[in-house]
Amino acid sequence: MINKTDKLFANSIKRYISQDNILKDNNRPLTLDGLAKKLKITKGKCWSNIHKLIKEGIIFEINNETQNGYYVDSELIQSLLTDKEESRMKKYIKYIDSPEWINKRALVIKRDNFKCQQCGNKQNLEVHHLTYEHFKDEPLKDLITLCSGCHKSIHYKKQVNSSG
């Protein structure tokens, strides 16, 4: 779970998030090592925060024909930094850890023949919400199995399309 130190770290990286949500300094993509140097903190300390934000899907690597670097989901960062008791992110994480979701996730992956419905990969499978209209009570038709790469790509494309 995200703690106070993670929030402080998330707040400190906000100034390095560009308009296209890529970690940058002077319009050049930042590596994770570069970010640690800019923040003047030890790699070990920085790494635990970065890995937690990566695990929660807030930061992920983009490496395609149009972008390279580390993408930051600005909505989730903002949600993380709000002090509301039940922020969107807290509700989401709580639900994703619930037995109801774990069971529903297993049903969707089985229905989709244990493979990514976009590329056919059978490893690192995740379940993607096609819509959040029925969040916490979603019918199986609102969910699809994707590998982690395709899942990240879909979220990245959504963010890019909504910002420009």
Image (spheres, rainbow, N blue to C red):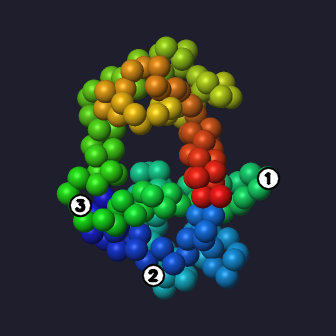
Q: Label 1 vs label 3: CA separation?
A: 38 Å
Q: Position of residue 99 (x, y in %)?
A: 26, 29
Q: Amino acid at mark 2?
A: Ile
Q: Residue at x 42, y 51 (%)?
A: 56
Q: Residue at x 30, y 65 (%)?
A: 82
**Mark 3 lies on residue:** 84
Q: Position of residue 95 (x, y in %)?
A: 29, 38
Element marked by disc 1: loop
Q: Position of residue 164 (x, y in %)?
A: 65, 58
**Mark 1 lies on residue:** 65
Looking at the rendering, in which quadrant would you find the N terminus?
bottom left
User: Against 58, is 157 above or below?
Assistant: above
State yes or no: discs 2 and 1 in contact (Cβ < 8 Å).
Answer: no
Counting residues from the start of the chain, the first of labels 2 and 1 encountered is: 2
Q: Amino acid at mark 1?
A: Glu
Snapshot quadrant of residue 22: bottom right
Question: Which tag is nearer the camera, tag 2 or tag 1?
Answer: 1
Horizontal side of 112 relative to 63 (left or right) equals left
Q: Residue furthest toward the bottom? A: 40
Q: Residue furthest toward the right? A: 65
Q: Which mark is residue 41?
A: 2
Q: Residue at x 74, y 51 (%)?
A: 64
Element marked by disc 3: loop
